[in-house]
Image (cartoon, rainbow, N blue to C red):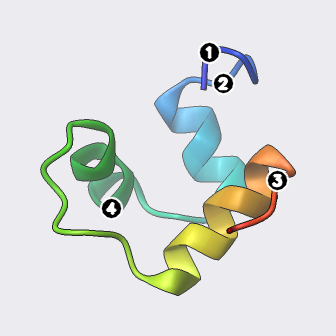
Amino acid sequence: MADAGLNETQLCKRSGVPQPTINPILLGESAGPRMPTIAKLAKAFKVSPE
């Protein structure tokens, strides 16, 4: 996120992924994000979801 110049709120807005979903991912508390979430985050960072 730092390399992209984004904070958590900006990432939520850019990706359309809600903050309650992003926060556990960032904290390493998520069992593993689902593919639709990964796809949205990858699009926000302009990278491939793979």
Q: Amino acid at mark 1?
A: Ala
Q: Which residue sits at x=30%, y=50%?
A: 25
Circle 1 sits in a helix, a strand or a loop, which is it? loop
Instruction: Give the mark nearer the N terminus: 3 vs 1.
Output: 1
Dot label at residue 2: 1
Neighbourhood count class around disc 2 (C-alpha, 10 Å): few under 14, some 14–19, many 20 upward: few
Circle 4 sits in a helix, a strand or a loop, which is it? helix
Circle 3 sits in a helix, a strand or a loop, which is it? loop
Asked if disc 2 and disc 4 are in contact, CB closer than 8 Å, the reply is no
Circle 2 sits in a helix, a strand or a loop, which is it? loop
The quadrant the N terminus occupies is top right
Neighbourhood count class around disc 4 (C-alpha, 10 Å): few under 14, some 14–19, many 20 upward: few
8 on left or right of 14? left
Dot label at residue 47: 3
Q: Residue furthest front?
A: 50
Instruction: Give the mark nearer the N terminus: 2 vs 4.
Output: 2
The quadrant the C terminus occupies is bottom right
Instruction: Give the mark nearer the N terminus: 3 vs 4.
Output: 4
Choose top left, top right, bottom left or bottom right for residue 33. bottom left
Q: Amino acid at mark 3?
A: Val
Dot label at residue 6: 2
Nearest the camera: 9 or 33?
33
Give the spatial CA distance, label 2 vs label 1: 6 Å
Numbered disc total: 4
Relative to 20, say whether 45 is above or below.
above
**Residue receiving disc 4:** 21
Q: Amino acid at mark 4?
A: Thr
Q: Which residue sits at x=21%, y=36%?
A: 27
